[in-house]
Image (cartoon, grey):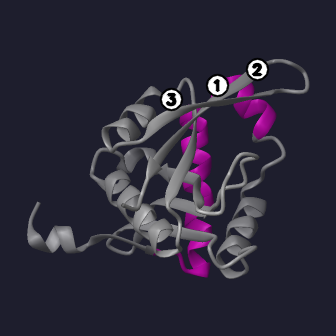
Amino acid sequence: MTDDTASLLHVRTAWPAEAAAIAPIQRRAWVQEWSPAERDALLVDSDLQSMVESWHGAIVAPPEARCRVLVALEGERVVGFAATAPSDDEDAEPGDGLVAEFAVDPPARGNGHGSRLMNALIDTLRSDGFRTASWWVRTTNDPLRAFLESAGWRPDGATQRFTADDESFTIKQVRLRVRITD
C-alpha cells in the first residue's frame, strides 16, 4: 500500500448524508451473516428507506451526546460503520460503553477497515469518558470473535438469547469486554 492509498483510508464521525450508505452496508452484512430463517423473519419489516431514516436520526439527533456513529472510508466511499453508546446492560456501571453496531461491507473486508474502525471506536469511547467497552457477539460469528479476541476483548461470562416468535430460530450471543483506560 502506498502512502497515497493509505491516506484515502480513514475513519471519522458520520455525516447525515452517509445514512444512505450505512443502511445498505448493514443489510448486506446481515444477509451474509444471518441464516435464511433469520433473514426472512427479521428483514421483512426492515425496508431500506426506514433503515436510512433510522441511521439519519442516529447521526443528527442521538439520544445523548455519547451516542456516536462512525464511518470507515476508502476515499469518499463508506465501506464500514460502527455505533457506540453508553452500555444499556442491566449490570452496566456508569463507565461502561457499548459497541452497538459494527459492520464492514462484505466486498471491502480484509483491507484493514475493521481494524481502523475498531481503533477509532475505542478512541471515541475513551474520549467520551468510558473505562470499559462491551460488545455482544453471536456465538456463531467465529471470525468476529477471533478478530476481537486478537485485540484483547474477552468473554465476561454474560450470555443472552433471542427466539423468534414462531420459534424458527434462536440467536445466542456472548458478551465480550475490554478495558480501554489504564
| Mark 3–mark 2 distance (CA, rounded to whole Å) | 15 Å
In the rendered image, residue 33, in percent from the top left (x then y), is placed at: 55, 33
Say what amino acid the circle numbered 3 marks. Asn
3 lies left or right of 57: left
For mark 3, what is the residue?
A: 141
Say what amino acid the circle numbered 1 marks. Ser
Q: Residue furthest left?
A: 2
**113 vs 55: above or below:** above
For mark 1, what is the residue?
A: 35
**74 vs 133: above or below:** below
**182 vs 160: above or below:** below
Regarding residue 78, the answer to whether it shows in the image is: no
- Position of the N terminus, as image quadrant, is bottom left
Query: In this picture, which residue range is highlighted in magenta?
Result: 13-42
Quadrant of res 121: bottom left
Q: Earlier in the sequence, mark 3 or mark 2?
A: 3
Main SS of residues in magenta: helix
Q: Earlier in the sequence, mark 3 or mark 1?
A: 1
Q: Reply yes or no: does residue 25 show up in magenta.
A: yes
42 lies left or right of 137: right
As drawn, the label of residue 169 is 2
Say what amino acid the circle numbered 2 marks. Phe
Q: Are marks 1 and 2 in contact (CB under 8 Å)?
A: yes
Regarding residue 22, the answer to whether it shows in the image is: yes
Classify 10 Å Cα crowding around label 2: few (below 14), some (14-19), many (20 and above): some
Q: Reply yes or no: does residue 40 show up in magenta.
A: yes
